């Protein structure tokens, strides 16, 4: 599991690192931990490849809430845990779907409870791998990394956070491969990852920084399926 700690206090970050190592030894879970002292450095290097983020709210420059909003534009599923000196700031965190918050100084048992919430959140994410036969080579990616897929003549384009992949295929074939639980067609030839949807308006679906057309014919079914996905029923 890949974890990032973003905190301008090296001392506080080292406490969390120590707790993660301690939990790892007791549970047998392996963590790959990165540390960022500045939020701007983290945002420059963030490419949808972390499972859990421990994010300090009060940092110089971009505060943790601002950073979280930027993260959500790129990744709707990464588990965010806010770390703060003042609990009242954490309420804002739920607006960016934070898993939880912990108040400094952080105790080990409180930390482990929150960590387990984050781990459970990660384990519930879709984990379907997709094999893409791109002209550059054969790529295996997690379906959760896909923003949307669109038809382009006799090919399909997989738009992900890191890059686009092209494969000679059809949307119909891709739909059958992925199933309709996590993906839906917002308009003819455009297949959207429900996990990456930020907003649905009358005529558009916001996915990452893209605004995709929502056709009248497919609007009702797409919206209903998305609500079922989010609600889990």
Image (spheres, rainbow, N blue to C red):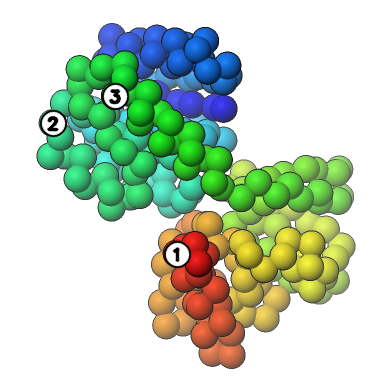
Does 121 sit above or below residue 154?
above
* Position of residue 129 in the picture relative to residue 197 (left or right): right
Mark 1 = which residue? 231
Measured from the top left, where is residue 127 in percent x and y? 65, 46
The front one of 141 and 162 is 141
Mark 2 = which residue? 86
Q: Could you tell me if residue 173 is visible in this image?
A: yes
Q: CA distance from mark 3 to mark 2?
A: 16 Å
Earlier in the chain: of badge 3 and badge 1, it is 3
Which residue occupies 47% across, 71% down? Answer: 227
The front one of 120 and 81 is 120
Does 131 sit above or below residue 17?
below
Rendering quarter of residue 168: bottom right
The front one of 63 and 86 is 86
Rendering quarter of residue 68: top left
Which residue occupies 35% across, 28% down? Answer: 113
Which quadrant, please, contains the N terminus?
Answer: top right
Q: Could you tell me if residue 210 is visible in this image?
A: no
Does 58 sit above or below residue 144?
above
How would you rate the neighbour count of disc 1 (Cα within 10 Å): few for under 14, some for 14-19, many for 20 or more? few
């Amino acid at each position: 599991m890949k974890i990032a700690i973003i905190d301008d206090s090296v001392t506080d970050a080292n406490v969390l690192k120590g707790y993660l190592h301690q939990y790892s030894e007791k549970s047998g879970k392996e963590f790959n931990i990165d540390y960022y002292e500045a939020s701007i450095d983290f945002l420059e290097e963030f490419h949808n490849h972390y499972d859990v983020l421990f994010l300090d709210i009060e940092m110089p420059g971009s505060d943790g809430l601002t950073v979280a909003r930027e993260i959500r534009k790129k990744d709707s599923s990464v588990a965010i845990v806010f770390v703060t000196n003042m609990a009242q700031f954490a309420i804002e965190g739920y607006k960016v779907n934070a898993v939880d918050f912990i108040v400094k100084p952080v105790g080990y048992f409180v930390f482990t409870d929150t960590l387990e919430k984050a781990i459970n959140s990660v384990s519930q994410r879709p984990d379907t791998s997709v094999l893409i036969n791109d002209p550059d080579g054969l790529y295996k990616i997690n379906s959760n990394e896909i923003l949307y897929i669109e038809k382009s003549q006799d090919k399909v384009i997989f738009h992900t956070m890191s890059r686009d992949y092209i494969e000679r295929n059809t949307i119909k074939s891709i739909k059958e491969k992925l199933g309709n639980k996590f993906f839906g067609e917002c308009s003819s030839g455009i297949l959207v990852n429900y996990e990456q949807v930020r907003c649905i308006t009358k005529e558009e679906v916001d996915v990452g920084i893209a605004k995709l057309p929502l056709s009248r014919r497919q609007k009702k079914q797409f919206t209903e399926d998305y609500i079922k996905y989010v609600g889990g029923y």
